[in-house]
Amino acid sequence: MDAKDILGLPKTPLTAPQEKKSRPQKDSQRKPDGISREVYALTGGLAPLMPAVDVSQLKRRPQSDEKVTWQWLPFTSSARTDNLQLYHWVRVVNGVPPTGDYSFAKYNKSVNVVKYTDEEYEKYLTDPTWTREETDQLFELCERFDLRFIVIADRFPSSRTVEDLKNRYYSVSRAILVARAPSSGDVSGHPLVKEPYNVSQEVERKRALSMILSQTKQQERKDAEVLAEAKRITEARIAARGAEESDMPVASNVSPESNEKNIIPVETVSPSSNVQIPPTTVAPPTSTADDISTLNSLRGMRVYLRTYALEQMVQAASSSAGLRTIKRVEQTLQDLGVNLKPKVPTKSVCAEHLELRKEILTLLNLQKQLQYKEAEGSSHRDGSYVETPGTPKRSHRTGEQDRTFIPDSISFGGERVGKRDQKRKAPAPPSPAQSKRPRKLKASD
Amino acid sequence: MPHTPSLSSPRNQSDVSESAIKLQRLVMGRSTDDPEKKIPNRRLKDVEICVPISYGTISFWLGRKASESQSHKWTVYVRGATNEDLGVVIRRAVFQLHPSFNNPMRVVDSPPFELSESGWGEFEIAITLYFHSDVCDKQLDLFHHLKLYPEDESGPQSTKKPVVVESYNEIVFPDPLDSFFARVKDHPAVIVPRLPASFNLPAPVPIENAKEKKRGDTKDHPLNQWFVNFSEADELLKLATARQQVQAHIVKLRRQLSVIDGLPRPLKPASDE
């Protein structure tokens, strides 16, 4: 037996004359009692060194000497204050019913509501807004209803808000506690003393909660958009501040003609560009820390070529992007019909080229983000659906085909935008067929 | 600081007189500018002087006159992009040719900075530009591949139509000396920013008197007709259009993202209602 081998125990000899004995022995070793052969075989056919489950317990039947009957017997519970006689089924062993209290009686806990004497009330607990009677009533209700303030507020004779009642109760308890304590140090650890009930805060909190709860869907969406916008703005501000701070030591030794530098780009751009760039949601060229450090290093050179400067700036701008992203940027440039290296690299052309590259990087990043978010969202809701680009899931909305994903290679260049939309409409399934899916999704929420 | 010309190095152009003039100039410069030279020249911060250039090669097939070793006649040059005189900025251009040429290092000390040769093979020409002392004491390297044979090999070569390859670029001098600025600020070959009127510049000191004999601009150059006209308008237009498209996409994506960001599941965008 391998197990005995491992343990180092002497093997049981299997000699010829003992074959008959050994066979039944082997049999029982092969198939232990209590579990079927197939199940035992699952363990590998070997007995575990340390059996996790006591095999003999697996099919234990009640001991033959015990006689169990079930009887309908009355019982009492220490939790009841009246003497109500209730009945239930009881497992009786050998004619002996079980002893002890009702097993659920131990769960009958109640709150220790403080009891104050008259003097104590006079000394510590008087309050202009609360009469003695009211306070007494409150405490009685608290005890009766185990500090379930909603119920208490409902039952309270004069109408008081839940916060008001809570405030009174907690301040009284606290005052009593502090008053009765031999020294202030003893009770300083007590939660009532450490964190007193703050009425105004509670009122505010509940008001805010109810506001959020009662928001309409529209408002919810608007809030989400505003928050996202705010987050983006703060992030942009932080980035700008970070860039500014790195810029500060550079800007500090600026001489009087420094503002000429700002005028130069304007001068070269406006007379030479015949194109009006619409100022709608155009982001002004933001210079990051990378840009500034590159510019500085360029200024350190006594002479350089415009193409060299552009290369450096492009490198700086794509420093955070991987090789694949850079390839995609170049692919996009080609799709847009723009030369990867400008044929006429004047100052303004290089500036525009750089900005275009940066914008393409932003675009690719946003695309990636959008894809991740959509994949996340769909995997949360429903594992079986996979969001693929181009499948409009919730297209029961009319019109907006542009909401569908922009596939990896943006089809620019030559194709008019209108055409693109028409092409997209073809593969989209008809809207009535779609209506089933969204409903299903809603149900699963 | 000034570069002392060495009279001993072999040159294709005999310019012993030129170097003598240069020495004279330096001496003159030193004596007249003495009070100013004592104070180191100021550098104009955040100002850049830009010189747009065009450099490249024009190559003619020699046709009947072609031989095995000399099938093409070509010229390599560096000119102002608007054909203005670059001599105001560039002091010397050195063209490094293929080692199979005699004296592969060809030096050109005056504008127009060009070199003509004949040969049979295409190779890379290294052009090194040296600037005047008040411009920059560092040299600038350009590289150009000499092209003899046209792109489309259809049909016979023509002796009349050359193979022209030009590259546009701009030489940028950041933080230039104010003396340099003063000297070139009104020169057509150079782009300078406008300084406030009250700005104090030193009186411009012209570098060369002797150079006025030979004109340095290429406006009437014999190869003029083949020069490429570079216009940035086309490129700017393409870039602007591209930027517009990309920006429109970005706006759309941003809107989509902000909707998704705020909610557990995406809803319709507000514009749909």
Image (cartoon, coloured by chain):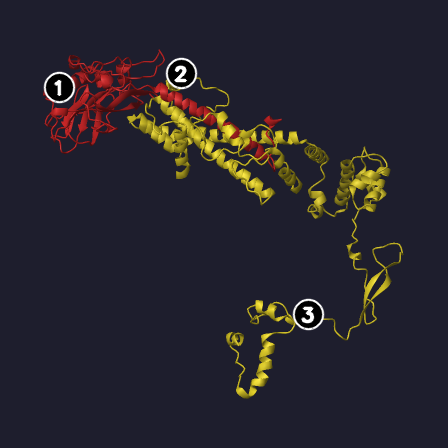
Q: Chain B's colour?
A: red
Mark 2 or 1, closer to the camera: 2
Note whether A118 is above or below A361 in the view shown.
below
Check disc 2 and give the amino acid type. Answer: Asn
Specify whether A306 is left or right of A235: left
Q: Quadrant of residue A38?
A: bottom right
Residue at mark 1: B18
Note whether A195 is above or below A68 in the view shown.
above
Q: Residue at x 71, y 43 (%)?
A: A193
Q: Residues within 10 Å of mark 3 (few under 14, many from 20)?
A: few
Q: Is residue A345 visible?
A: yes
Q: Residues within 10 Å of mark 1 (few under 14, many from 20)?
A: some
State how far apart marks 3 and 1 are (Cα).
Answer: 117 Å
Check disc 1 and give the amino acid type. Answer: Glu
- The chain ID associated with circle 2 is A
Q: Quadrant of residue A31?
A: bottom right
Residue at mark 3: A59
- The chain ID associated with circle 1 is B
Labels 3, 1: one chain: no
Q: Chain A's colour?
A: yellow
Q: Residue at x 74, y 48 (%)?
A: A182
Q: Residue furthest top?
A: B197
| Precedes in sequence: disc 2 or disc 3 | 3
Residue at mark 2: A274
